[in-house]
Amino acid sequence: MPLKNRGAVLRACLCAGAVAASLVTAGPATADEAPDKVACAHSYEQAQRLRRAQQLRASREELRVCSRVECPATLRKECAQWLLEVDGAIPTIIVVARGADGRPASDVRIRIDGELVADQATRAAIPLEPGTHVVRFDAPGAPAIEEHVTLRAGDRDRRIDVTFGATRAGAEQSTSERPVPPLVYALGAGGLLALGIGGYFQIDGMSSRQDLYGCAPRCAQGDVDDARRSLWIGNIGLGVGVVALVAATVLYFTRP
């Protein structure tokens, strides 16, 4: 049998025998106790099962046991590697709570899935299992706030901002309300006025130019100048009107 396969078989036998023995002994050692070989093998198996079930925090505790120096080197090496992977995959959230005045609120009780996890809001990361959680915030003198957050393995430092004293209806209204600046109305009215004036002089100039075709080339110079002046004013008015209306449209759609 190849040496690599023989080592795998020996390791499997060691784990199976140790796990079987653990069934007739006390529970596994904690991370603060010096584990024996039976406890090492039990934590080795449990850590894998918990990791597959996405119970990463529980899996991490088991891996801390089987990665200790008292455990066999074969198990210890794999547990140490898995511990790094699981620790990096555990999602975390950071809560930022504020009062109605916008100042940080520290006197906030945080419950996650009904369990009290903090008596005050801090910027410290709170580890959670992957999945959807109900996060409830309670502050003195203010209605409780609940947030539903869905986390995946590897989501780190997901920030949750809550503000006490501001209702959801008010928040939605302030989000959807976009006041129109007075400049939009001014530009719109000015643009329409400029288009009207420009259009009038443009029509007048074109009409005057049409009349000049009948007397050309002996038309009076004053009539020629009047036609040119009307066309010139008309072009300027139309240009100013178009620019003003475009500016009003852009300002309307980009208003805060």
Image (spheres, helix red, strand yellow):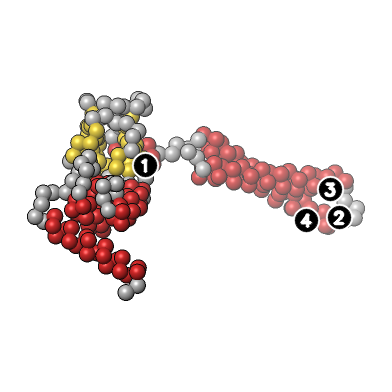
Q: Nearer the viewer, residue 49 or 96?
A: 49
Are there few (<14), some (14-19), or many (20+) residues within 10 Å of tag 3? some
Q: Position of residue 163 (x, y in %)?
A: 32, 32
N-term-proximal mark, 3 vs 1: 1
Q: Can the viewer see residue 86?
A: no
Judged from this view, the residue extending furthest toward the right is 218
* Number of the front mark, 4 or 2: 4
| Number of other residues with Cα within 10 Å of mark 2, as a class: few under 14, some 14 to 19, many 20 or more | few
Amino acid marked by disc 2: Cys
From the viewer's perspective, is 159 left or right of 198? left
Q: Residue at x 88, y 47 (%)?
A: 220
Closer to us: 177 or 17: 17
Which residue has dot 2 on it?
215
- Which of 169 and 49 lies nearest the eye of the viewer? 49
How far is mark 4 from mark 3, CA to CA?
11 Å
- The secondary structure type at the circle numbered 2 is helix
According to the picture, the residue beneath numbered tag 4 turns out to be 210
- Looking at the image, which residue sits at the far left? 24
Number of callouts: 4
State which tag comes first along the sequence, 4 or 3. Answer: 4
Q: Which residue is mark 1?
A: 157
Q: For numbered disc 4, what is the local secondary structure? A: helix
- Label 1 near label 3: C-beta < 8 Å? no
The residue indicated by pointer 3 is 224
Nearer the observer, 160 or 247:
160
Q: Residue at x 24, y 33 (%)?
A: 118
Mark 4 or mark 1, which is nearer the start of the sequence? Answer: 1
